[in-house]
Amino acid sequence: MTATAPPVAPSDEPAEQSASARVRFYLRRLAPLAFAVTAGLLLYVSFPPRELPWLAPISFALFGVAVYGRRLRAGFGLGLAFGLAYLVPLLSWTGVDVGPLPWLALAAAEALLVSLAGTGIAYVSRLPLWPLWASGVWIASEALRARAPFGGFPWGKVAFGQPSGVFLPLASLGGTPLLGFGVVLCGFGLGALALRVRKVRRASSEDASPLKGLSFLKDRLKDKGVAAAAAFTVAPVVAGAVAMPFVATGAEAGTARVALIQGNVPRMGLDFNAQRRAVLDYHVRETMKLAAKIKSGQVERPDLVLWPENSSDIDPYVNQDAYDEITKAAQAVGVPISVGAVVTAKDGTPRNRLIQWDPKTGPGAVYDKRHLQPFGEYMPYRGFFRIFSKEVDRAGEFVPGKKPVVFDMAGTKVGNVTCYEAAFDDTVRDQVREGAQILSVPSNNATFERSQMTYQQLAMDRVRAVEHGRTVMVPVTSGVSAVIRADGSIAQQTGMFEPATLLADVPKRTSQTLATRVGVWPEALIVAIGVGGLAWAVVRARAGRRSDA
């Protein structure tokens, strides 16, 4: 009889290897999504009030790695994930008083526009020098978001997260588009460099010979792609550092002593509008305190006084009490006051207006807010949106102004940019070109309570100061009011929900930065870079299909 070998127990090794392979497969599939979400969160965290501008390039490095070489559909999905992770927390202040639905709807709509950028970036990532084209695509998407729909919503532009740091001086050369382009290019360059290094490490690990691996590494370091990625990473940093000493802050037409009045509001939230007289009284009271200090010799008389937006929600043209109270305050300090008021224009339409109030002659020059906030100051398609929420009836029916107006206040030319308008490049630039020696951004943030909105808007104002080389004064009903130097630094600021007065001697400047002079052209050039990259990618794809055929 022939002996038979004992049966061999089946090995679990193939099953274990299969399970491990599946895990690695799913991790590879999930890694881009994790990178995109992490990138979006990092970009959010880079914004004030935390002020960590150096996180923004890291964010775009991760996002670039996530979408690199992906299909268009994947680029769209990853862009959507990036946009939601970024914009949902960034815009949380929009739901403070109206609930989560408008907030989430706005964030989702903006994220969909970001997803278009993700699609374009994935498409151009197959091109040589892809970080350049990808950065152009991103700025093109920001240009679109700043204009559509409903007049655009520029909130969340990359530039507005850079109120300090090495990139900020780029704003004086090409405005917010160049500043944002520099940050994004640095990030995508860093991502491209990381991808190259990863490729080198993989290649060297496949060769057991250390000498051969070192030789391959040396060859790769000479690779033009590595050099280009390194150049894209470093060039914006160097450009910002070189431009920094040329950011001018000195007086060119003397100085002006300016007082900012923060009267505070009776209580937070939209209900404060029901107490409009109290808001006016608070600002009159704080101004009268300043007048008393002037009379007693405690402080020097200012040249002009700035009140916030909505400091008089009672129309002083038709309400004699409001007219008399403002006149009393102006006569007490003895200098002109810029008053933010809600008025009815001669044509019967409501306006969000700034009024130059002279202590002797009363109301004079006016500026009507030109960029109104949709769903707040006016309601587009009111009947349609009422289907989803009756909250739309709380939105106003304001009519926008048509032109920039600079106030000549006791010899100081003050350019007016009312609150939300600070987010729009053209509105601020128009006032400087009109002759503004200083900028005033009167605001009313009481509706948004203690949310991040105030600090995000203050960061915008700091960027605008550098962009146009002007001191920016920010009087706010409830805070944070601030005096911002032309280099973007904060000279003085108040707390929130407290009455306060700021007094500052500020330089009057007349020269225009390069960004002010060239206007929209840097944005147009950068958008052309992005569009050119997309066109090149289309041509290459068609040529590839013809060669395959």
Image (spheres, rainbow, N blue to C red):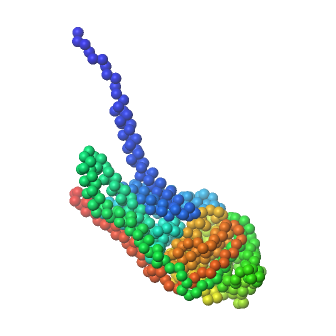
Image position, residue 423 (x, y; %): 54, 72
Q: Quadrant of the N terminus?
A: top left
Q: Is residue 252 left or right of residue 29?
A: right
- Residue 450 image-quadrant placement: bottom right
Image position, residue 425 (x, y; %): 50, 75
Q: Is residue 77 left or right of residue 365?
A: left
- Residue 67 image-quadrant placement: bottom left
Residue 526 appears anywhere in the view: yes
Please, is residue 290 above or below residue 408 in the view? above
Please, is residue 320 above or below residue 206 in the view? below
Instruction: Tally the numbered discs.
Output: 0
Measuring 41% from the left and 69% from the top, which residue is drawn there?
238
Residue 384 appears anywhere in the view: no
Q: Of 160 and 444, which appears nearest the observer?
A: 160
Measuring 68% from the left and 73% from the top, which residue is drawn there?
262
Image position, residue 547 (x, y; %): 22, 59
- Residue 120 image-quadrant placement: bottom left
